[in-house]
Image (cartoon, coloured by chain):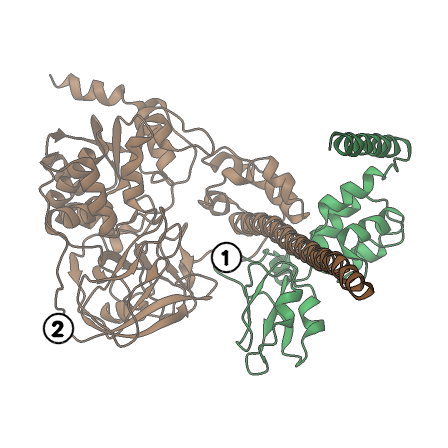
């Protein structure tokens, strides 16, 4: 009995020490920029960018393989924020990126069969429903990634502009036509 | 003796403390001599569930329900919210969405009631004797009655009455300034219902536990000052009626406090930090009705004015009455209005649909003719500095405007955009007609939206992390289950093997025995 306990603990300690040593010895220094990018990205791992999750995109971006505009659910604001961390070559893509309205998924209830595929895939649990029950999207939790649209077997999901509520509404920017009247007067 | 009052006015803080602002033409004479008239029950009542600052109320009636006057139809949700009551008896014909009384015209959750014309009261709230009631009971009654700040800010009054728990309050200021041009509803209310207002003021003073009460009225309302000075006592209080200069924006609570006490409220702080609470006169009237008679807030006084209105008037209307019916009650339009506003001309909001309802915070309907609306010839900014001279919070509007035009919203916020009251003094004084306050409206809205989007991004990140953690936990649980099952299977196998071995061992000697027996 005692021998067994002693042997196991000796083995455990030995292996633990070895692991600890190995961790120090073979430590791979991740570039801090990856962590910085990772912190900015939405972190929902939706896969809309084509990379394996947000961390994958962060690595690709740090390596200069992915543009700062790769994250579509993040939109222009996120790209601008990323551009302060990552060096970008030629800002053509960034300035060309229009300020898009936030999009959310919408389920056509007539086409929904209640297969539960979409809500199993949704990275933010923004879809509720049950087997053979019509599903619906919680717009406040939806990031507008394409994950659910891809898996829907009946193509019942579309993306549309997030409906504006009174709380988010604001006046348009007034664009005064300078001197419009004075030219009229002159003419 | 005759020297004394003049000395006291000489030493009054308002002589030493003033703020910048503007002096727009009051144009109150249009409606100031019209007595408050009671409008008959309208053909339709629409009650938006959000008539106050805070969370929207939760409907507790369904379609086809019959409701009585004063019956609770939507319940306050959360600590900062307000109850909504049926203004008359009738049938609920819809609990859905309707256009908001707001420039956006977006649909908002609304309860629609078709009045049956009988105007039958349901059971009212219990009547109270404020002399014997505790402050908690009074504020509970005010909350039950769904009273919100009726000067236009629509902050739930009960929340403000409960401030005594957190702050050391000593003064209650009753805001009867009514600094917006055209509006006369508070003026008429003070002239006609002074006794009721005084009682409401006393009740609020008791609920707040303050020592002093000041009623502030602008100098352009001599009759109201006169009447309120006669009715200057209620419960145990004798309150001071103080005349404040006629200046816009005198009704802003921070400015009123500064003029009356000489103290300046810090940016983004509450006047309660100085021990002062400000309530509107119309709120005091509503509190009187709620506490003495148990009547919830179901009507308000609205000023109908402007040169495009045929008969300017002060009308007592039920909450939820369509704007078009109020205008028709006042004889319709004299001419097609250039702009239709809900509220005063400085801070009121234009509405595009005339079927929208009157809400608790709507103090005026202004039909402005072409001659009354500002010109639109915009000239370049010449840095004349008039906007700086007029800004009551001491900002530099032309600089903020330049930054916003260059899409530098954060830069504008750095020089005080968030402290902007959007009072409109800058745009009013600008000789070049530059839409200054309009630009600040846009910038403030945009920044708020950005903030909410950021908040949403953080929340979705949290959701995604929660989902990941959950999935990992499920996978881990499955693995554990598998291991357990495996161990069980192995144990079973082992047990079976041992059993077999034991059986075999037991069988062997027997076999040997039988063999031995056979051999012998």
> As drawn, is B445 to the left or to the right of B11?
right
Residue B105's place in the image compared with B287, above or below, is below
* Front label number (1 vs 2): 2
User: In the picture, which quadrant includes the C terminus of chain B?
Assistant: bottom right
Judging by colour alone, the chain drawn in green in this rendered image is A
Residue B26's place in the image compared with B371, above or below, is above
Task: Work out whether residue B10 or residue B465 is closer to the camera in this orientation and state it.
Answer: B465
x and y percent of residue B491 in the render? 69, 54
Q: Which residue is mark 2?
A: B118
Q: Would you call the spot at circle 1 few (<14 residues within 10 Å), some (14-19), or many (20 or more)? A: few
Residue B129's place in the image compared with B210, above or below, is below
Q: Which residue is mark 1?
A: B375
Residue found at the very far front of the displayed protein = B520
Q: Quadrant of residue B30?
A: bottom left
Are the numbered discs 1 and 2 placed on the same chain, yes or no? yes
Task: Work out whether residue B2 or residue A87 is closer to the camera in this orientation and state it.
Answer: A87
> As drawn, is B507 to the left or to the right of B174?
right
x and y percent of residue B108 in the render? 42, 65
x and y percent of residue B424 in the render? 46, 46
Does dot 2 land on a helix, a strand or a loop?
Answer: loop
The residue shown at (63%, 44%) is: B409
Task: Work out whether residue B423 or residue A115 is closer to the camera in this orientation and state it.
Answer: A115
Q: Would you call the spot at circle 2 few (<14 residues within 10 Å), some (14-19), or many (20 or more)? A: few
Disc nearer the start of the sequence (1/2): 2
x and y percent of residue B454 in the render? 61, 49
> As drawn, is A113 to the left or to the right of B349?
right
Residue A171 visible from this viewpoint: yes
Q: Quadrant of residue A108?
A: bottom right
C-alpha separation, residue under disc 1 versus residue under disc 2: 48 Å
Judging by colour alone, the chain drawn in brown in this rendered image is B
Name the subunit of mark 1. Answer: B
């Amino acid at each position: 009995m005692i021998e067994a306990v002693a042997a196991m603990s000796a083995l455990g300690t030995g292996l633990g020490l070895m692991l600890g040593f190995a961790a120090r010895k073979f430590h791979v220094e991740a570039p801090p920029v990856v962590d910085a990018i990772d912190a900015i990205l939405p972190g929902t791992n939706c896969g809309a960018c084509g990379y394996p999750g947000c961390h994958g995109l962060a690595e690709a971006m740090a390596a200069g393989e992915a543009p700062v505009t790769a994250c579509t659910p993040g939109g222009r604001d996120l790209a601008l924020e990323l551009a302060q961390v990552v060096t970008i070559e030629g800002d053509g893509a960034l300035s060309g990126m229009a300020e898009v309205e936030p999009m959310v998924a919408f389920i056509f209830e007539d086409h929904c069969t209640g297969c539960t595929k979409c809500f199993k895939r949704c990275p933010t649990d923004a879809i509720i429903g049950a087997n053979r029950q019509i599903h619906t999207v919680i717009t406040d939790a939806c990031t507008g990634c394409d994950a659910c649209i891809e898996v829907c077997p009946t193509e019942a999901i579309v993306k549309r502009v997030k409906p504006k509520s009174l709380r988010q509404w604001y006046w348009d920017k007034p664009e005064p036509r300078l001197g419009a009247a004075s030219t009229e007067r002159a003419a | 003796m005759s020297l004394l009052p003049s000395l006291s006015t000489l030493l009054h803080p308002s002589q030493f403390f003033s703020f910048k602002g503007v002096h727009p033409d009051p144009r109150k004479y249009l409606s100031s001599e019209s007595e408050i008239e009671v409008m008959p029950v309208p053909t339709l009542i629409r009650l938006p569930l959000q008539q106050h600052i805070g969370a929207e109320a939760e409907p507790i009636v369904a379609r086809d329900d019959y409701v009585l006057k004063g019956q609770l139809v939507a319940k306050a949700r959360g600590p900062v919210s307000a109850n909504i009551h049926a203004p008359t008896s009738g049938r609920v014909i819809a609990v859905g969405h309707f256009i908001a009384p707001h420039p956006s015209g977006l649909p908002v959750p609304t309860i629609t009631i078709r009045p049956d014309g009988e105007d039958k009261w349901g059971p009212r709230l219990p009547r109270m004797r404020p002399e014997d009631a505790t402050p908690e009971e009074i504020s509970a009654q005010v909350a039950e009655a769904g009273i919100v700040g009726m000067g236009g800010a629509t902050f739930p009054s009960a929340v403000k009455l409960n401030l005594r728990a957190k702050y050391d309050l000593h003064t209650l200021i009753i805001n009867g300034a009514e600094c917006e041009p055209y509006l006369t509803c508070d003026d008429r209310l003070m002239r006609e219902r002074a006794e009721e207002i005084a009682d409401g003021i006393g009740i609020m003073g008791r609920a707040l536990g303050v020592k002093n009460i000041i009623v502030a009225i602008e100098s352009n309302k001599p009759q109201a000052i006169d009447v309120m000075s006669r009715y200057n006592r209620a419960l145990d209080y004798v309150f001071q009626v103080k005349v404040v200069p006629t200046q816009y924006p005198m009704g802003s609570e921070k400015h009123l406090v500064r003029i009356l006490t000489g103290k300046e409220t810090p940016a983004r702080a509450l006047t309660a930090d100085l021990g002062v609470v400000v309530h509107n006169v119309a709120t005091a009237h509503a509190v009187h009705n709620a506490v003495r008679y148990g009547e919830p807030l179901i009507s308000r006084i609205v000023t109908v004015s402007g040169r495009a209105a045929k008969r300017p008037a002060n009308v007592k209307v039920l909450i939820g009455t369509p704007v078009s019916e109020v205008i028709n009650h006042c004889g319709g339009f004299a001419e097609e209005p250039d702009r239709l506003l809900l509220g005063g001309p400085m801070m009121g909001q234009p509405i595009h649909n005339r079927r929208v309802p009157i809400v608790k915070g709507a103090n005026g309907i202004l039909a402005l003719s072409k001659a009354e609306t500002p010109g639109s010839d915009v000239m370049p900014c010449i840095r004349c500095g008039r906007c700086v001279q007029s800004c009551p919070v001491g900002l530099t509007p032309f600089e903020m405007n330049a930054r916003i035009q260059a899409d530098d919203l954060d830069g504008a916020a750095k020089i005080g955009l968030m402290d902007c009251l959007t009072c409109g003094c800058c745009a009013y004084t600008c000789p070049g007609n530059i839409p200054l306050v309009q630009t600040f409206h846009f910038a403030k809205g945009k920044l708020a939206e950005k903030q909410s989007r950021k908040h949403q991004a953080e929340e979705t990140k949290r959701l995604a992390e929660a989902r990941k953690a959950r999935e990992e936990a499920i996978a881990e649980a499955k693995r554990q289950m598998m291991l357990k099952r495996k161990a069980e299977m192995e144990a079973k196998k082992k047990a079976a093997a041992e059993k077999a071995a034991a059986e075999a061992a037991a069988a062997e000697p027997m076999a040997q025995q039988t063999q031995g027996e056979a051999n012998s």
